[in-house]
Image (cartoon, rainbow, N blue to C red):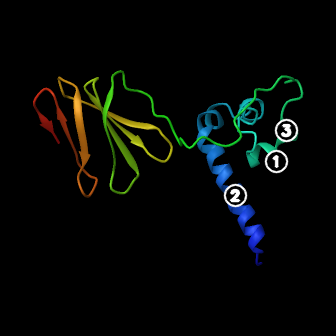
Amino acid sequence: MLLRKEDLFQLVNIVGDARRFIQYYQWIIENNPLQVYASALIFSPAYSLIRRFFKLEEPKWITSKPIMRNDWSPCLQTLEGHSGWVYSVVFSHDSKYLALASADETIKIWDASNGNCLQTLEGHSGWVSSVVFSHDSKHLASASDDETIKI
């Protein structure tokens, strides 16, 4: 089956919008899937294709809906979890992981695709100022104001 150029363009847009929807509302979808209809659709951007496709699924009892921005934010994810300033952020060379160094004396390793914190590394006795992956992404080096470098 061959698609016309216009149909292919529309399909790419739908898949892209669905990806943003799932990425943005991943926690809700995984933990409270029925809230997708009551919350996620309503709080999606006004021009979201997924919101438009499922407009009839929105609960009728919600009479006052928020005014939402027209398009998705350029921000893909917000990672939260450190209790101090974040001084350094680095992607692994394969772009699968993020490492964040913080004033809370820890390094957090995150899954870049879904924003889940995979591990918290402790051991420095001062704020961690820098972090870097080895070229093969199997090791991590960190520098701290405790005057140490840890691998």
* Residue occupying image coordinates x 24% and y 57%: 135
- Badge 1 or badge 2: first in the primary sequence: 2
Residue type pointed to by label 1:
Phe
Tell me the number on the disc at residue 53. 1
Real-space CA distance between mark 3 and mark 1, rounded to the nearest whole angstrom: 9 Å
Instruction: For mark 1, give the secondary structure.
Output: helix
Q: Quadrant of the C terminus?
A: top left
> In the rendered structure, which amino acid carries the disc numbered 2?
Asn
Q: Is residue 55 left or right of residue 12?
A: right
Left or right position of 146 against 9: left
Q: Residue furthest left?
A: 147
Secondary structure at numbered mark 2: helix
Residue on which disc 2 sits? 13
Nearer the observer: mark 3 or 1; the answer is 1
Kindly identify which residue carries mark 3: 57
Comparing 56 with 76, the one in front is 76
Across and down, in percent, residue 36 comes to 72, 35
User: Where, by quadrant of the figure, is residue 105 drawn?
Assistant: top left
Q: Which of the 4 quarters of the picture holds residue 35? A: top right
Tell me which numbered mark, 2 or 3, is placed earlier along the sequence: 2
Q: Residue at x 68, y 62 (%)?
A: 12
Q: Nearer the viewer, residue 114 or 147?
A: 147
Disc 3, SS: helix
Q: Amino acid at mark 3?
A: Glu
